[in-house]
Amino acid sequence: MTSTDAAFTGSIPQIYDRYLAPLLFTPFAEDMAERVAMLTPSQILETAAGTGLATIAIFDRLPTAHLTATDLNQAMLDVASSRISSSNVKIRQADAQSLPFSDESFDIVVCQFGMMFLPDRAAGYSEANRVLKSGGRFIFNVWNSLEQNPVPKTVADAVTTLFAADPPTFFSRVPWGYSDIAQLEGDVLSGGFQSVTVNTIEKRSLATSCEEAAIGLCQGTPLRPEIEARGDLEYVTQMAAAALENAFGVGPINQPMSARVITATK
């Protein structure tokens, strides 16, 4: 883990929210919200809430529940705060590795594509367990491997080609680097949970153009500072867009994507 791996600052939050929601996150946010709603919790904690995509989806289904959405990056939460206004939703900055909540405060803890970013995942699992009530659930998702997610893999390969002597490794190290089922099960159980299930789900990755997908992935993620440390961001984004067009054709993108969904019971 490097100092920039979890840095969603500057213009990254706005680009992330505009371009990556349909490309990567909205379909899985809807899936997450359905899973949470089936359990009808009254007290929900969301960690690594980002710009609030899963937060909104959960609130839409459970408007009377009390939902606390947290993230390490205030800039991401500022975007979330601009679109959510309800006395039942609290948004606050917090570190998932050291949560500022009392023991057994929540029925469910939710985390959408956040556990990969924690430098100390063991602390993250332990904290989720601590703040859950007895019998409570921790529901989170992580990406499957890059090989099962062709859009980001195409961009990763293009960037690697441009910087072959010192390729950026953020995609393979962090967001798409924590998908092994045995490792996931072992890590969760080590956090004190009684049981864990891991499911693989498939969705569609959508973008109106290859250019927009490239902007989102190159400029709206912590891949950006890795690119900027090596070359020109705009040029690399253009080359990534060209690689996507070569792989999927000119026009809208509609490609498969794959993630793991993990449910752990305290």
Image (cartoon, helix red, strand yellow):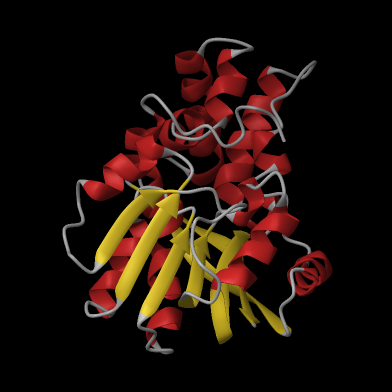
Direction from residue 103 to residue 264 in the image, left or right: right
Q: Quadrant of the C terminus?
A: bottom right
98 up-or-down from 197: above or below? above
Residue at the spot x=55%, y=76% of the render? Answer: 132
48 or 222, which lies in front?
48
Q: Is residue 46 visible?
A: yes
Residue at the spot x=35%, y=57% of the render? Answer: 53
Q: Position of residue 149 (x, y in %)?
A: 61, 54
103 or 115, which lies in front?
103
83 up-or-down from 182: above or below? above
Direction from residue 134 to residue 108 in the image, left or right: left
Residue at the spot x=57%, y=44% of the render? Answer: 152
Q: Position of residue 35 (x, y in %)?
A: 45, 81
Q: Position of residue 171 (x, y in %)?
A: 65, 40
Direction from residue 68 to residue 117 in the image, left or right: right
Q: Position of residue 136 (x, y in %)?
A: 55, 84
Q: Quadrant of the N terminus?
A: top right
13 up-or-down from 68: above or below? above
40 up-or-down from 47: above or below? below
Figure disc tally: 0
Residue at the spot x=57%, y=65% of the render? Answer: 141
Residue 42 in which image quadrant: bottom left
Q: Is residue 253 visible?
A: no
